[in-house]
Image (cartoon, grey):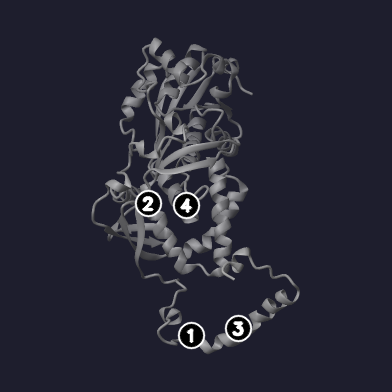
Amino acid sequence: MTSVADLKGQTVGFAASGGLDSCTITRWLTEQGVRVVCFTADMAQPDETDFRAIEERMRACGAADFVALPLHDMIAAAGIEVIQFQAKYEGAYWNTTGIGRHVIVAGMVPELRRRGIRVLAHGATGRGNDQVRFQLCTNMLAPELTVYAPWRDPAFLQQFRGRAEMIDYCLARKLPIKASKEAPYSTDANLLGLTHEAGKLEHLTTSPWFVQPGMGVLPSQGPAEPEAVTIRFVQGVPTAINGQLLSPFQAIRRANALAGRHGVGICTHVVENRFVGIKSRGVYEAPGMELLGSAYAFLLQLILDRRGRELFDPLSLFMARQIYQGYGFDLASHMARAALAPLTRLATGTITVQLYKGRVEFLAAEDVPHQLYSESNASMEAVGEFDHADSEGFVRVLQVSARALAASGQVVPPAWTNIGH
């Protein structure tokens, strides 16, 4: 394990958000004789737009240099891939922070190499998933680099047990922090969404609705009238919203605005299984991901056949875990991408949905060249191209196995079949 004593006299590249942890760690490392270069990822996070202010804050805390990484397009492309996989962890979380950590490392590594810096430091705690994501992503993309985590360093832990000690430390040194001991929760943000956790949210008796949304309004505060939104996908990528051609970054940003004002994807409450083995509670905001992801799900319904769906669903769950756990760059993820590619090439179409009070509802689908749905075959009003009489032989084949199950005593009706008899 790398300790601060091992780093004395060296330069570390520190993934700094500009918050309390960043300020504390930067100053503490500097006091221990370590030269700190702060790297802040510009991922269009809605809660922090003034990167000059972050630079001033980090330099005031002792940073020898500051690098703002322009990662708008990278986080957008990564977010689109999450949508294509429908990679929601445990069914509700769009992996916004999980994929964000992959993007940060992918953005930092080339700059670290260019500057000859051989240590990547981060402020993730020893209780969460981010420490694993930073570690594994760095190890995979740049195995020659050392990863240093202060929250796993006994020297750091001896001085800082948590938020209160860090605040006292920063105040004693007159560092320009914005945090306070009264903060009800902490937030992590990027273009794809906000994750709120800790503080009052650790108490299950606390309703999630006290969280102040940063990307829209609560569903109950949405407009009284629904709004229709039309999204054009070309080979799995949203290329236009309401007829306006957009880049992936622009599409997600536009979707955030449209969905956010209707409370879509705002304050999604999840008690999830962290990779480290403990339960955690989070309140998530991902309005654009929820809008685009739901529209894409409607498109996939038209394209996937039965066997394709049976393969896609576990692939989706698998990739959600991969991203959540920090394995987004490994061989298995590469294999999953290869498996998804044939479907993505077919995913072209125009989907219209309705936004209302936190919901995304289907309205229409048009110009889907690879859809399997046929109005004539599906019609219940007329025989059409599908001859209902042809099903007689099909059903006769199926009844053979059904009767065999009964004859062998393998049919066990549930108890509710006896109710009322």
Q: Earlier in the sequence, mark 1 or mark 2?
A: 2
Q: Earlier in the sequence, mark 2 or mark 3?
A: 2
Q: Earlier in the sequence, mark 2 or mark 4?
A: 4
Badge nearest the viewer, 3 or 1: 3
Label 1 neighbour load within 10 Å: few <14, some 14-19, many 20+: few
**Mark 2 and mark 4 residues within 8 Å of each other at the beta carbon:** no
Q: Earlier in the sequence, mark 3 or mark 1?
A: 1
**Mark 4 and mark 1 residues within 8 Å of each other at the beta carbon:** no
Badge nearest the viewer, 2 or 3: 3
Which residue in the protein does label 4 denote? 81
Q: Amino acid at mark 3?
A: Phe
Q: Earlier in the sequence, mark 3 or mark 4?
A: 4
> Viewed as shown, does residue 102 lie left or right of 397?
left
Which residue in the protein does label 2 denote? 248
Give me the C-alpha separation between circle 4 and circle 1. Answer: 37 Å
Q: Amino acid at mark 1?
A: Phe
**Looking at the rendering, in which quadrant would you find the C terminus?**
bottom right
Which residue in the protein does label 3 denote? 394
Give me the C-alpha separation between circle 2 and circle 4. Answer: 11 Å
